């Protein structure tokens, strides 16, 4: 869940909603695993952070963090594959990082 939400805005999921969300996260992770070896071959990696309202958030790690081709990898690689294989995915965004870690 987004850290910007107040306690009133955070809705507790029913067991059915939780099962659907977990299934979706599993399908997203499975699809990311298809492209992960290509990213790792260049010294990087990708980590699934969250999914909310059609938007997948990922962290780009290793060599990817400072790579000039990160937008291409994100948009034409990860996003294209996820949107093609998982209809619920509308966009992929990258978790922003600082020298002190992710925020």
Image: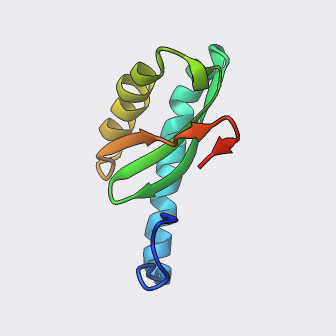
Q: Residue at x 39, y 41 (%)?
A: 92
Residue lying at the far right of the rendered structure: 100
Q: Nearer the viewer, residue 97 or 15?
A: 97
How has the structure been colored for display?
rainbow
Q: Is 63 above or below relative to 55?
A: above
Q: Residue at x 38, y 32 (%)?
A: 81
Q: Is residue 98 above or below residue 21?
A: above
* Residue sitting nearer the eye, 97 or 47: 97
Is residue 79 placed above or below 5 in the rendered structure? Answer: above
Say left or right for 1 vs 42: left
> Which one is nearer the viewer's eye here, 81 or 42?
42
Residue 88 position, x and y percent, is 31, 53
x, y percent for residue 83 = 32, 39
- Residue 95 in the image, given as x and y percentages of width and height: 51, 43
Q: Position of residue 80 (x, y in %)?
A: 34, 31
Count of residue discs = 0
Name the residue: 42% across, 48% down.
56
- Relative to 84, residue 50 above or below: below
Q: Residue at x 68, y 42 (%)?
A: 101
Answer with left or right where residue 18 lies relative to residue 64.
left
């Amino acid at each position: 869940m987004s850290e910007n939400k107040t306690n009133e805005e955070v809705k507790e999921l029913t067991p059915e909603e939780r099962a659907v969300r977990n299934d979706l996260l599993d399908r997203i992770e499975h699809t990311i695993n298809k492209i992960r070896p290509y990213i790792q071959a260049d010294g990087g990696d990708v980590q699934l952070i969250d999914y909310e309202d059609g938007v997948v958030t990922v962290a780009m790690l290793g060599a990817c963090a400072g790579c000039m081709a990160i937008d291409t990898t994100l948009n034409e690689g990860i996003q294209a594959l996820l949107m093609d294989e998982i209809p619920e995915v509308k966009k992929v965004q990258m978790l922003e990082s600082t020298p002190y870690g992710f925020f």
